[in-house]
Image: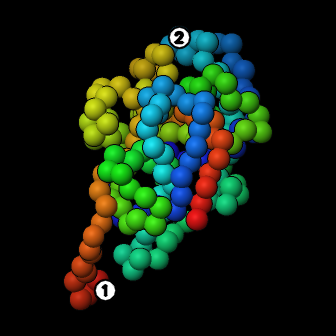
Amino acid sequence: MYIGQVAGTVVATIKHPFFMGRKLLFVERLELTGQTTTRYDIAVDTVQAGVGDRVLVLDEGNSGRQVCDVEPWGPVRAVIVGIVDALTLAQEAA
Amino acid sequence: MNLARVIGTVVANHKYPGLSGVKLLIVQPLDRRQHAVGDPVVATDATAQAGPGELVFIVGGREAALALPETFVPVDHSVVGIVDEVDLR
């Protein structure tokens, strides 16, 4: 899992049936300092996240399918599983 | 799952049996500004409707095969949607 920031939304009409009715968000990966990086994911939202939110992103298929309740099937990998309220770093890491 | 641009098609008559009838595309992964990043890859088309020039989103890894009718196939990237709009703040 990693911490990301929702940068926007993705709209697709023609898509795999799994994605029908699911919200796709564009999430940029964050460094621990909060800086955005060039890495990103198009993630399925399961927690009603919005643009600008700092979120917890899962990028693993098996857990993603469990969260989306489509086990063992479904071409999903990146899933937003939480909205981050606070993040504390130890002195050394900060 | 990432953005990519379809830049070509691949035709292979003789391939793994589970892949017959599956369309192959060459896709170029993109960054958030939709500039090319990394090397192009060959991906199967799970939408069956994507064509060259289109902006799509792809899934990589084991999940790529799960997008296809036959799910136990040797595939590592699949096009799973054709993107109409990306709205970034």
**Cα–Cα gap, marks 1 and 2:** 53 Å
Counting from the top left corner in percent of width and height, residue A66 is at 26, 36
Residue A17 in view in this figure: yes
Q: Residues within 10 Å of mark 2 (few under 14, many from 20)?
A: few
Q: Which residue is mark 1?
A: A94
User: Residue type at mark 1?
Assistant: Ala
Quadrant in the picture for the C terminus of chain A: bottom left
Q: Quadrant of the N terminus of chain A?
A: bottom left
Three-letter amino acid code at disc 2? Pro
Image coords of residue B71 (percent x, y): 42, 20
Q: Numbered disc 2: what chain?
A: B
The answer to whether B76 appears left or right of B42 in the picture is left
The residue located at (39%, 80%) in the rendering is A33
Tell me, yes or no, if residue A29 can be seen here: no
Which chain hosts label 1?
Answer: A
Residue A89 position (above or below residue A56): below
SS label for mark 1 = loop
Q: How is the image coloured?
A: rainbow
Q: Where, by quadrant of the figure, is residue B33 drawn?
A: bottom right
Which of the 4 image quarters holds residue A88? Answer: bottom left
Q: Is residue B51 left or right of residue B74?
A: right
Marks counted in the figure total 2
Judged by depth in the image, the label closer to the viewer, 1 or 2, is 1
**Where does label 2 land, which residue?**
B17
